[in-house]
Image (tube, rainbow, N blue to C red):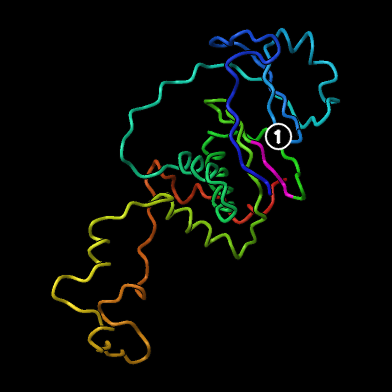
Amino acid sequence: MIEWNIQTRSKACQACHKSFVEKDVYYTSLLDQRGGLERFDVCEDCWKSQYSQGVNHRKGFISFWQGVFTAPAPPPPEAIQKENAESLLRQIIGQNDPQLAPAAFILAAMLERKRLLKVKAATNQDGHRITVYEHVKTGEVLTIPDPNLQLNQLESVQHQVAQLLRHGLNPPVTPAAMSAATPAEGTSSAAETGETSEAVPGGAAGPESSSSLPSPPVELSANAQEPSDMPASDTSSRD
């Protein structure tokens, strides 16, 4: 099974072990090894003296690129807020659930359009197309499998992404939901009393039923990305 992963940018050259400082130029090579895709970061001096010649002939070579090191910013204080596309994508990658692969693919495409992710390479593993992204600010490498979405699947996946952005992967159970699931004191369920609700002609749900009511239009916040950020119907392939 193809696993998603995030590989952080090294804080030091992996050849001479000299620590990177602000604005240092570094070079990243992406290699296909037995354990999966691996990144290799070296300083400019080591690149020129040891790796620049014949790098594309190294075993498992996929791609390389140049970057400029920036020290990571301190993490912001935690706040209770709706998920944004980046935090949701990180959670999905951490879970590595194949059922969430289409959502991860859509989220990555949204972040690419926002210029937060850059495509660095595309490769195939075990018959699956893999897109390799680099995070513009942190230098992390993210590998996202292509779920080969069909046109007739796109709308449902976009709806799933909108719901995940609104509620998160594991929405908390609210007291209202718990009380709704537990019969109030002194009341009995329909099964206990033998009573059944009166059917509505035509099979429509009664006035208290919400399952047949149309869902309100999805309006995503600025953090949650706008619907227009979602990829168009050409997401089934990336040339």
Is 11 located above or below residue 188 in the figure? above
Specify the quadrant of the image occupied by residue 21: top right
Q: Residue at x 75, y 30 (%)?
A: 31
Query: What segment carries the magenta color?
Result: 128-132
Secondary structure mostly seen in the magenta stretch: strand
- Callout count: 1
Picture residue at 65% right of the left edge, 61% below the top:
150
Residue that label 1 marks: 37
Up-down: is 228 above or below 86? below
> In terms of depth relative to the viewer, which is nearer, 102 or 15?
15
For this rendering, which residue is in front, 76 or 18?
18
Q: Pinpoint residue 59: horizontal percent, then vertical percent.
A: 83, 28
Would you say residue 62 sits in the magenta stretch?
no
Q: Please state which of residues 89 and 38 is positioned toward the viewer in this rendering.
A: 38
Query: How far across and how far down the image is residue 153, in percent?
Result: 59, 63
Question: Residue 145's x, y, as percent?
Answer: 65, 46
As for residue 130 lying within the magenta part, the answer is yes
Q: Amino acid at mark 1?
A: Leu
Location of residue 4 (image quadrant): top right
Residue 33 vertical placement versus 144 (above, below): above
**Looking at the image, which residue is at 61% across and 31% down?**
141
Outermost residue, bottom direction?
Answer: 201
Please state the horizontal and vertical placement of residue 1, each as a whole percent of the image. Answer: 68, 49
The answer to whether 28 appears left or right of 19 in the picture is right
Residue at position x 60%, y 11% in the image: 24
Disc 1 on helix, strand or loop?
strand
**Quarter of the rendering occupied by the C terminus:** top right
Mark 1, residues whose alpha carbon is within 10 Å: few (<14), some, or many (≥20)? many
